[in-house]
Image (cartoon, coloured by chain):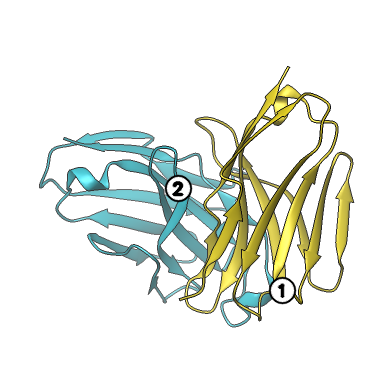
Amino acid sequence: NAGVTQTPKFQVLKTGQSMTLQCAQDMNHNSMYWYRQDPGMGLRLIYYSASEGTTDKGEVPNGYNVSRLNKREFSLRLESAAPSQTSVYFCASSALDGTDYSSGNTIYFGEGSWLTVV
Amino acid sequence: GENVEQHPSTLSVQEGDSAVIKCTYSDSASNYFPWYKQELGKRPQLIIDIRSNVGEKKDQRIAVTLNKTAKHFSLHITETQPEDSAVYFCLTTSGTYKYIFGTGTRLKVLA
């Protein structure tokens, strides 16, 4: 039981390049999330998927796209990377049923992906 | 939109003293209030959580208290140790964004 697995762990991109961050969870969770964390800062929600087949924008969605490929996998794509997207990206999942967010369920995080855009 | 305010942003305490971190939220529908600890270079990990049907929960040296009327909840760490040094985040639900994090508190325990 690996939990939440994300790849790659480290990546350096040139401005304008594209890339996809991959995330998979093996806990049969309904909800999945992508957060970014800038140095010394908190976590900001980029996109989330409350259930398979649905995705919604979070606090900072500009410059990103996501795909909920199936219940296990949720990918984040940068179409044209910019230096402002240099950050640590965390994928996360929870058993949360998207129809009842207020009940709450533990969020489990992947180990993070360190992305530098030069 | 919904937000959560976390204070203080930094906190230094002497080893053995207590530390208290507070979060204030705005979504009155929130029913779940967890706290996460993030060590340098690592992922955030849940350390304690509380649901709105209780006012306090304790797990050894850490405790969380909730005041739903005032819409705030607090993390209490007693008998602090150097390994408690980390960044602590509260989390709350949002009508728009599901889960959003507080801005974090950098706790430093001085030996």
Task: Single out the residue that lies furthest toward the left.
Answer: A16
When the figure is inspected, residue A56 is found, relative to residue A11, above or below; the finding is below
Residue under label 1, please give it. B31
* Chain with colour yellow in the figure: B
Look at the image and tell me in which quarter the C terminus of chain A lies: top left
| Chain of the residue under label 2 | A
Q: Which residue is drawn at 43% across and 56% down?
A: A44
Q: Nearer the viewer, residue A43 or A53?
A: A43
Contact between marks 2 and 1 (CB within 8 A): the answer is no
Q: Which of B27 and A31 is in front in this view?
A: B27
In the image, taking residue B78 as reference, residue B46 lies left or right, namely: left
* Residue matched to label 2: A90
**Visual hue assigned to chain A:** cyan
Task: Tell me, yes or no, if residue A75 can be seen here.
Answer: yes
Q: Which amino acid does label 2 sit on?
A: Phe
Helix, strand or loop at mark 2: strand
Residue drawn where x is 38% and y is 43% of the image? A38
Quadrant (top left, top right, bottom left, bottom right) of the N terminus of chain A: top right
Q: Is any atom of residue A73 visible in this view?
A: no
Badge 1 marks a residue whose secondary structure is loop
